[in-house]
Image: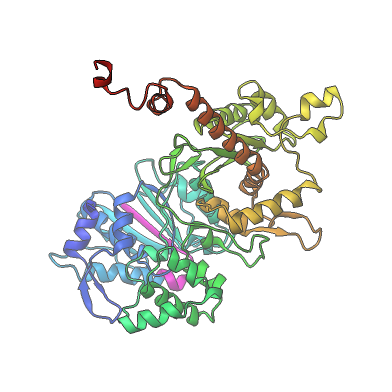
């Protein structure tokens, strides 16, 4: 991948101490190169530990101060000790350049000025200076943002100080469900103008151990299911990666939750908490093919695929920026999640139109839409746009002709039905369905049985929109499979009746009285 101008300067001029303290040329590692090539200017970077993201930003901004006039670069860390370490790294870059040293003027404990370029690099601690009141910042990097105190209050001023042409990178390891978690989830859903640049540990080439053949064979025969090793190996992790993982687990006293939070493989693992989810086992597979196809809509690979059948579950919200309206799409034949739509600003009526569009896109999928509250309006809109035979209907709700108009379509979630639908989803996700959405996986991990009320719901401060949508899909899975089987049967019978299909023509000739394929020609003339 091609490097940015700043990346080229870093690799051609900068030096850095390696893990042994030896000065070496700064060659971008795999995570740094990927970030360098994919920056958008408004980037959130949830990551595993020690992948060099902060080192990259410090070098990038140092290069920018040397390359561009009137650069105002600011890096803010979460505590004073980290600030001092970051500033020392910048001084190291400047003092050890391969080539002519830049002219410096102000060099204090927090600031370096480049007078010939009119540029300044300032490094500080969150909360020690009120940016955004008269400051203009061209390059802003927020380090370990999830550990800031009062982050929302501080970020308001900071973001206002950066013009649209400037760049902002907010980087952190996870620290539970806080403002950083909310920002990352909104960006992942496509509900903000930020981009998520996620760097899982297993894609970082340096996180492995060199093993000889005997060591690999021994580890292969002694994979530990409690540490999820067989599933990880089946999912593509090498023995060297598993050995590295064991080494880190040992350092963390085999606390699997802590390891996943510090070295996540999926976006949701960055924000793991200690809560015990009711979804103890989930068949989840990370996929590079799970991509944002349009605003709010993630799709797996080239789905929908002609000839395959789909079922869709939906959860309806008000569309006022709080809860999200969600669709979860599963493939009947392949038993996996193939799409997800999530939008917290779409009103219930427009959501009905969106459901119809997505349902038709996925080969006229079978729909199960929750009809609680705003769902009634959504279903009323959907009814006029989509075949009623392909929308889940609960006959038990038809208690009168008036109520039938309101409740004949959709799935009603109550204290009685919620345990049933969640139980059905648990079975599907542990034994049959594979999911690919980090958003769904994250919400599943924080869906609990409330110890006080006994209710099945999201942990305080978390959402469960995708969980309810997936549970609706699970409730319709049996009917969707029956419909898929019926469609295949109808297609087969239709093909059997078609006189122009080559197979039918050959079959008719084979069974005809004139012989196969036709009577011998010499018999006619003798």
Q: Residue furthest top?
A: 525
| Residue 313 visible somewhere in the drawing | no
Q: Which of 184/348 is in front?
A: 348
| Residue 446 visible somewhere in the drawing | yes
Q: Residue at x 58, y 31 (%)?
A: 355
479 lies left or right of 6: right
Tell me where residue 308 appears, x and y as whole percent. 49, 38
156 lies left or right of 519: right
Tell me where residue 278 appears, x and y as whole percent. 68, 61
Q: Residue furthest right?
A: 400
Q: Residue at x 23, y 63 (%)?
A: 104
Q: Residue at x 46, y 22 (%)?
A: 498
Range of residues picked out in magenta = 72-83
20 above or below 151?
below
Q: Residue at x 24, y 58 (%)?
A: 63
253 above or below 137?
below
Tell me where residue 22 appears, x and y as whole percent. 23, 80
* Rendering colour mode: rainbow
| Residue 77 magenta-highlighted | yes
Quadrant that contains the C terminus: top left
Q: Which of 196/42 is in front?
A: 196
Looking at the rendered structure, the number of numbered marks drawn on it comes to 0
């Amino acid at each position: 991948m091609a490097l940015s101008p700043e990346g080229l300067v870093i690799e051609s001029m900068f030096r850095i101490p390696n893990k042994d303290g030896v000065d070496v040329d700064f060659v971008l590692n795999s995570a740094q190169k990927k970030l360098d090539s994919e920056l958008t200017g408004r980037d959130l970077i949830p990551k595993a530990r020690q992948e060099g993201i902060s080192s990259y930003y410090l070098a990038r901004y140092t290069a920018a101060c040397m390359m561009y006039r009137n650069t105002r670069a600011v890096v803010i860390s979460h505590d004073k000790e980290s600030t001092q370490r970051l500033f020392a790294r910048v001084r190291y870059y400047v003092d050890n350049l391969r080539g002519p040293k830049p002219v410096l003027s102000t060099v204090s404990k927090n600031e370096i000025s480049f007078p010939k370029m009119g540029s300044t690099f300032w490094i500080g601690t969150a909360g020690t200076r009120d940016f955004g009141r008269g400051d203009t910042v061209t390059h802003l990097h927020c380090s370990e943002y999830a550990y800031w105190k009062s982050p929302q209050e501080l970020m308001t001023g900071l973001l206002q100080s950066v013009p649209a042409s400037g760049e902002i990178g907010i980087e952190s390891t996870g620290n539970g469900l806080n403002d950083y978690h909310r920002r990352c989830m909104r960006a992942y859903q496509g509900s903000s103008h930020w981009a998520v640049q996620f760097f899982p540990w297993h894609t970082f080439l340096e996180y492995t151990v060199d093993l000889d053949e005997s060591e690999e064979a021994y580890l292969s025969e002694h994979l530990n299911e409690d540490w999820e090793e067989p599933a990880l190996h089946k999912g593509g992790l090498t023995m060297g990666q598993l050995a590295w993982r064991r080494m880190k687990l040992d350092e963390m006293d085999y606390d699997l939750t802590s390891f996943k939070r510090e070295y996540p493989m999926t976006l949701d693992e960055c924000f793991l908490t200690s809560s015990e989810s009711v979804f103890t086992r989930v068949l989840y597979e990370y996929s590079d093919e799970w991509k944002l196809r349009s605003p709010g809509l993630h799709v797996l690979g080239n789905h929908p695929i002609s000839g395959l059948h789909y079922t869709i579950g939906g959860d309806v919200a008000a569309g006022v920026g709080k809860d999200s309206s969600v669709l979860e799409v599963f493939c009947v034949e392949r038993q996996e999640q193939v799409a997800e739509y999530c939008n917290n600003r779409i009103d219930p009526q427009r959501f009905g139109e969106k459901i119809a569009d997505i349902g038709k896109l996925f080969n006229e999928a079978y729909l199960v839409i929750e009809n609680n509250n705003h769902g009634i309006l959504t279903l009323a809109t959907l009814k006029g746009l989509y075949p009623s035979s392909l929308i889940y209907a609960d006959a038990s709700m038809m208690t009168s002709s008036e109520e039938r108009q309101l409740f004949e379509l959709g799935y009603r979630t109550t204290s009685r039905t919620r345990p049933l639908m969640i139980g059905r989803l648990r079975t599907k996700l542990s034994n049959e369905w594979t999911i690919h959405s980090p958003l769904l996986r994250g919400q599943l991990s924080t869906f609990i049985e409330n110890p006080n009320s006994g209710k099945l719901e999201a942990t305080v401060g978390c959402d469960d929109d995708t969980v309810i949508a997936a549970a609706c899909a699970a409730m319709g899975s049996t009917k969707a499979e029956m419909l898929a089987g019926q469609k295949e049967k109808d297609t087969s019978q239709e093909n059997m009746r078609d006189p122009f299909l080559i197979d039918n023509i050959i079959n008719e000739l084979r069974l005809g009285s004139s012989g196969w394929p036709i009577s011998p020609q010499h018999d006619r003339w003798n």
